[in-house]
Amino acid sequence: MRLYKFVKPLQAFILTGSEVALANKCNLLGAKSWKSNASELNTFIRGDIKAREALKKKIKTTLKGYQENHCFYCGIHFSLLKNENSNVHIDHFYPKGAEHGNYEKFVFEMNNLVLSCCLCNGLGIKGENDYGINNDESILRIGSTIIHPYFDNIDEHFLLNENTGVIEFINIDKSKAIKTEEVFRLNSPAQIRARLGDILVELHTENDSGRSLSERITDSIGLCGRVALN
């Protein structure tokens, strides 16, 4: 099992009937509906906060399966994160807190939600940075300068060089791959070393079968902070 790999989610989360109603209510209220309490959400009724939190938990659990437990952006396996529950984030690809406010209506839009590690979703990397192109009422027509989890196929943009650990750009149009690598520093020395360690462990698995993969990769090569999350 690779601990670093890029995975296109199997699909977006699918809402049930009652969940659709709640999501629509939240989308009308905008960004504040993601976390605010009932007193700040004038259309919420008794039970809506509990239902919202249950839905967010269900989305996270389901997307972990769809993404094979990997961060969409850097490919790290979530098992490498300390305090995995709090360090795995539901990221809004088009940020709900963007200054222009155009994405608030997508706060519970399933094609806008993907799982990310806390490093990639941090303020110093993606956070609330906006990589959308167009201001459009339809999420399908906004476009993006980085690879979208559902509207793009990451495997058509990235290829891991097994000899060097470097992510290569393979699409005819390399602009999204280049920008995505730049934003998430995918070819930084730390990330290259982590991927090479992963490859090394896989090659020598038969000689050290008594230990877990995460133990072997951590010991085989320094991850330079990629797993040092509190």
Image (tube, grey):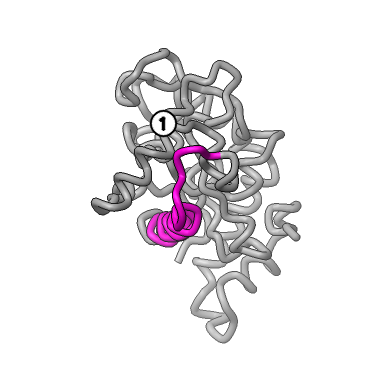
Q: Is residue 153 left or right of residue 135?
A: left
- Outermost residue toward the left in this view: 17
Image quadrant for the N terminus? bottom left
Q: Residue at x 45, y 60 (%)?
A: 54
- Residue 55 picture quarter: bottom left
Q: Residue at x 61, y 63 (%)?
A: 84
Q: Residue at x 34, y 19 (%)?
A: 137
- The residue range painted magenta reads 41-64
> Which element is circle 1 on?
helix
Residue 218 % position (x, y):
67, 66
User: Looking at the image, can residue 112 be seen?
Assistant: yes
Please check the rendered image and state whether residue 45 is part of the magenta-colored stretch, yes or no.
Answer: yes
Residue 43 % position (x, y):
45, 39
**Mark 1 Cα shell of 10 Å, populated few (<14), some (14-19), many (≥20):** some
Residue 130 % position (x, y):
55, 23
As drawn, 28 above or below 108 = above
Residue at the disc numbered 1: 28
Q: Residue at x 36, y 48 (%)?
A: 9
Residue type, numbered disc 1: Leu
Q: Number of callouts in the render? A: 1
As drawn, 204 above or below 93 = below
**Magenta portion: prevailing SS class:** helix
Residue 129 % position (x, y):
60, 26
Q: Nearer the viewer, residue 197 or 186?
A: 186
Q: Nearer the viewer, residue 153 or 203?
A: 153
User: Looking at the image, can residue 163 be seen?
Assistant: no
Image quadrant for the C terminus? bottom right
Q: Nearer the viewer, residue 9 or 153?
A: 9
As drawn, 184 above or below 48 = above
